[in-house]
Amino acid sequence: MTLSRKDVERIAELAALHVDEQQLPQLTQQIARIIDYVSQLDAADVGSDAATWLATSPPQPLRPDEVRPADLTRDLKSFAPAFREGVFVVPRLTAMEDE
Amino acid sequence: MTALAERARVAADRIEAAERRGLHAVLAFDRNVLLEQATKLDAAPTDGALTGLVIGVKDNIATLEYPTTCGSRILEGYRSPYEATAIKRLKRAGALIACKTNLDEFAMGSSTEHSAFGRTQHPEQPDLVPGGSSGGSAALVASGGADAALGSETGGSVRQPASFCGIVGIKPTYGRVSRYGLVAFGSSLDQIGMFGRDVRTAGRVLCAISGRDPNDATSADRPPLEFPEIPNDLLGFTIGVPKEYFPDDLDAGVRAACDRAIAHLRKAGAKIKQVSLPHTGLAIPTYYILAPAEASSNLARYDGVRYGPRYAPGEGDVQAMYRATRGVGFGPEVRRRIIVGTYVLSAGYYDAYYRKALRARWLIARDFDSVFAGGVDLLFTPSTPTTAFRAGDKLEDPVAMYLADVFSCPANLAWVTALSVPVGRSDGLPVGGQFIAPQFGEARMLQAASVLEALVDRAAEAR
């Protein structure tokens, strides 16, 4: 399949990734080449018995449910871009209707 | 000056000299930090298994002494508020944490050219790459700046640079070493690995950091590994040689060095058996669907709010800030992988790519299970299809770069353990041979690799 510049723009938007206009042609070409390459799996017979094989895998080891102190050596505020009155300060999520 | 302080001083001098020569293996180093650790250890000596061992740490593993940048602008200057379990265990064993080492951004790459802070040179030929993504760690150890180093593996990022730089690199079984404090790339594949100039040093580092960690739910419920007794021969070992790892277009010098290594193994008493791993050809396409898919999810957290610098476009809402920060903060290879990962997980393509790749992964893992269940203790293959390549040669063609991992990424997909050990040279450049062992089969692998290492060294001395 061939990926278009528009496809790449749409995926970049889904991934919250700004891409410069002038980078788009080369990026589209490279992504198309990667997708074409991995598409060779299409032709492979990967069977349907994978679920059976997975069922024999060892179970996930679990630890007891217990509350433990945070493993931090510094205050939260020392590694936040902005911190005020005990909370992280972040950009506004969206413009308010009445503003 | 005590022996320990002298050791630290020599390491510091070597690191500074190598960096002055332009090696660029190191992203953060302060000789006082290293010397202070030696002083503290002198004041309160331990009988730790790694006392005085000088260790470099790949800059995607959290340390308190230095920033943890992952070789990315998006984490420039970031200081972790906690340290990785592997680092805690190294310190407990008496090791000295020397520096943070260069890497391909977020460990995505096979040449260390994708670091936002400049490429690392090959330790012997500056115009070549040291391999990657743990190229800084490999070059540091190969140049004598540290006794050992930590790296990380998602698809061969320790074994491939170990092979290119002529040292030993280990990828432990998934779950053998805690990933707590290793910055996540592909969580079902990631594992902390280690480098040393010989099998024993790398193996001792593995032993010191192995074992269950309640902070990592995927760490296996097993006691720490103990370094095995090294036998004088390999009687009783059956070593499989998979035909898929010796294709017709394999570099002639790599093939010759591996053939000589197989002859050494046979002479040491091992039974050599031709085997087949029929789904090997699916490994690279499978890996380059699954790893970017996991990366696109793991890297969603870098948005300018919780980590690193924030780039605001001047106007717009928080979405505009996310896009601007990520657009400026991530380099070209990381951007490509995020886009590929988002694409293969998107509605309409999930079944065709992601689900199919999951099934292919199970088939690749089953190939290994079948061979090991058939009486083979270990597999032996080349670590890489070529020796170190020229910087810039593969930068514009991502698929050509991905193919450098063709012999290494199957072991990551199959959750097994593998190791690269030097087996000779081709046109003057190091060639690595790879052992692959079943899950938690590190002890037998270390034994066979130690025996082969001694035979290769002896043969080199005799020439």
Image (cartoon, grey):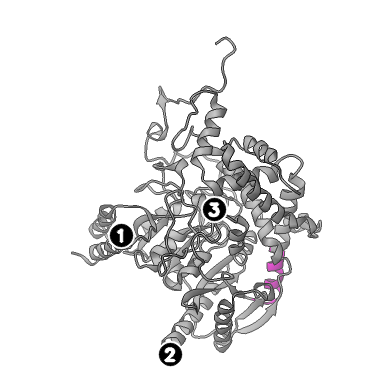
Question: Which image quadrant for residue B109?
Answer: bottom right
Q: CA separation, marks 2 and 1? A: 35 Å
Q: Residue B20 carries which label?
A: 1
Q: CA separation, marks 2 and 3? A: 40 Å
Mark closest to the chain's N terminus, 2 or 1: 1
Q: Main secondary structure of the magenta part?
A: helix
Identify the amino acid type marked 1.
Arg
Q: Residue B108 carries which label?
A: 3
| Residue A28: image location, x then y, percent | 65, 45
Do the numbered discs 2 and 1 sit on residues whose CB atoms are within 8 Å?
Answer: no
- Relative depth, front residue between B130 and B200: B130
- Tell which tag, 2 or 1, sits nearer the viewer: 1
- The answer to if A70 sits in the magenta stretch is no
| Residue B347: image location, x then y, percent | 74, 39
Q: Residue at x 54, y 26 (%)?
A: B318
Q: Give the range drawn in magenta.
A: B365-376
Q: Which mark is residue B462?
A: 2
